[in-house]
Image (cartoon, rainbow, N blue to C red):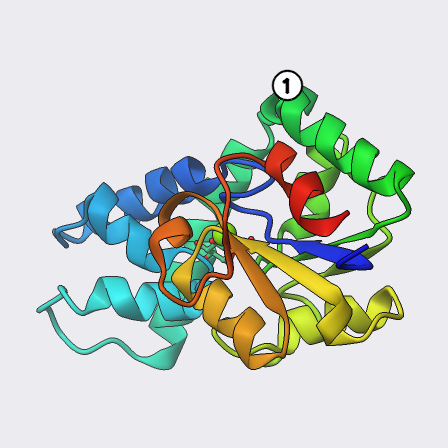
Amino acid sequence: MKFKGIIFDLDGVLVHTDKLHYRAWKKIADARGIPFNEEMNNLLRGVSRMESLEIILRNYHGPALSAEEKEAIAEEKNRYYREELETMTPEDVTEEVRESLTALKAAGIKVAVGSSSKNTRFILKQVGLDKIFDGVSDGTNITKSKPDPEVFLKAAEYVSLAPADCLVVEDAVAGIEAAKSGGMKAAGIGDAASCEKTDYRIAALADLKDIVL
Ligand code: B16
Ligand code: MG
């Protein structure tokens, strides 16, 4: 076995909450006349909520906002996002994802989540993935978000594995960088598949068994 554990990013890898993040940020941007489109949304992949807001505000040219006002905007965005998350069901996880996780576990691989999202546990419950993971590291247990490796180092710790024994699966360049600076190998899917630091390019999670076993 090449790896003893796999750490999965959540948004963009296990589930497609990226569209829901986009719709919530779009409401915030439109209400304030800030230009925002799906291409700009890609810059927010794997980035924390407050850092995402700062990126969006680069195109805001109104009066300066206080820290409290920014907090309030981030909370408003999260309310819109949570309304969207309420509508998620187990059908929002593909059979391919569910079967891949089950097969990897059956082969003796530890599976963990490494996500910047503070909504991770709620999302996992909504889609019925809350029982399958051996460890969950998310936005609630870190002080620095991707590209800092903290979220993945904690995930490895939670499943009692050394970073070098773990493969990280990511859709964001910030996530690939986080994995590499944490001493882990990284598999890129979607946007991250073209990142030059990616060790393995995958089209689907079903490809992982050929890499890890
Ligand atoms: P929340 P990941 C990330 O999830 C998203 O890609 C990113 O767009 C979002 O801002 C971040 O979570 C924080 O999410 O507002 O729910 O705490 O890709 O690291 O699973
Ligand atoms: Mg992601």
Judge from the rendering whether residue 57 lies leftward or rightward of residue 17; answer left or right. left
Judge from the rendering whether residue 20 lies leftward or rightward of residue 148; answer left or right. left
Q: Amino acid at mark 1?
A: Glu
Expressed as whole percent of the image width and height from the top left, the position of residue 129 reads 76, 36
Q: Tell me if residue 116 can be seen.
A: no
* Residue pictured at 14% horizontal, 54% vertical: 34
Q: Tell me if residue 176 can be seen.
A: yes
Question: Quarter-wise, where is residue 91 in the image?
Answer: top right
Expressed as whole percent of the image width and height from the top left, the position of residue 181 reads 54, 80
Residue placed most toward the observer, 141 or 175? 175
In the depicted structure, whether residue 183 falls above or below residue 192: below
**Helix or strand or loop: what does disc 1 sit on?**
helix
* Residue pictured at 54% horizontal, 74% vertical: 180
Expressed as whole percent of the image width and height from the top left, the position of residue 72 reads 41, 64
* Residue pictured at 19% horizontal, 44% vertical: 37
Residue placed most toward the observer, 185 or 19? 185
* Residue pictured at 49% horizontal, 64% vertical: 175
Residue placed most toward the observer, 165 or 118? 165
Judge from the rendering whether residue 79 lies leftward or rightward of residue 37; answer left or right. right
Per the image, the residue denoted by label 1 is 91
Mark 1 surroundings within 10 Å by alpha-carbon count, few (fewer than 14), some (14 through 19), many (20 or more): few
Question: Quarter-wise, where is residue 161 in the image?
Answer: bottom right
Q: The N terminus is located in which quarter?
A: bottom right
Expressed as whole percent of the image width and height from the top left, the position of residue 28 reads 29, 49
